[in-house]
Image (cartoon, rainbow, N blue to C red):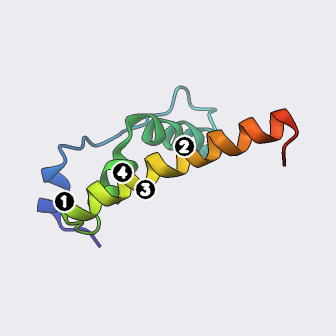
Amino acid sequence: MLAKSHLLRYNTRMIQVTRKDSKESLENMLRRFSRKVQQSGNVIIVKQGQYFEKPISKRDRRDKAIIRRERKSIKLKKIKLGQR
C-alpha cells in the first residue's frame, strides 16, 4: 500500500465519476472511471516510482534500448532483402 505522502509527491488528482442519469448502470460508470484513470496517466506515474532505481542503471537501460532498436532495424532490413 502506498503512503499518502508518496502519492502527493507525484501531484496526482482524485478522479470522480458521477451518474449521468438515474438509469445509468454501475458497469457503465465503472467503464468511464477506468477510462479516465488510464487517460490521466496516474497509474503509470505511480508504478514508475514504486521502486528506486539508481541513475546509472537508468542510463544503462537507455543504452540497451538504443542497441535493441538498432539490432531490430538491421534484422528487419535483412528480412526485407531476403538475406535471412
Q: Circle 4 is placed at which residue position?
A: 62
Q: Distance between the residues labelled 4 and 2?
A: 13 Å
Dot 1 amino acid type: Pro
Of helix, strand and loop, which one carries label 3?
helix
**Mark 3 vs 4: CB contact within 8 A:** yes
Q: Distance between the residues labelled 1 and 2?
A: 23 Å
Report the side of 81 relative to 54 (left or right): right
Point out residue 9 in the picture as x, y percentages from the top left corner: 13, 52
Point out residue 55 in the picture as x, y percentages from the top left corner: 19, 59
Q: Which residue corresponds to the image point at 77% horizontal and 40% vertical from the top-left?
A: 78
Q: Circle 3 is placed at which residue position?
A: 64
Front-most of residues 43 and 71 = 71
Q: Which quadrant of the figure has residue 57? A: bottom left
Q: Circle 2 is placed at which residue position?
A: 70
Dot 3 amino acid type: Lys
Front-most of residues 12 and 23 = 12
Closest to the camera, between mark 3 and mark 1, is 3
Q: Circle 1 is placed at which residue position?
A: 55
Point out residue 6 in the picture as x, y percentages from the top left corner: 16, 61
Q: Residue 76 carries which label?
A: none
Q: How crowded is mark 1: few (under 14 residues within 10 Å), some or many (20 or more)?
A: few
Of helix, strand and loop, which one carries label 4?
helix
Q: Which residue corresponds to the image point at 43% horizontal and 56% vertical from the top-left?
A: 64
Q: Distance between the residues labelled 4 and 1?
A: 11 Å
Dot 2 amino acid type: Glu
Q: Which quadrant of the figure has residue 83? A: top right
Of helix, strand and loop, which one carries label 1?
helix
Q: How crowded is mark 4: few (under 14 residues within 10 Å), some or many (20 or more)?
A: few
Dot 4 amino acid type: Arg
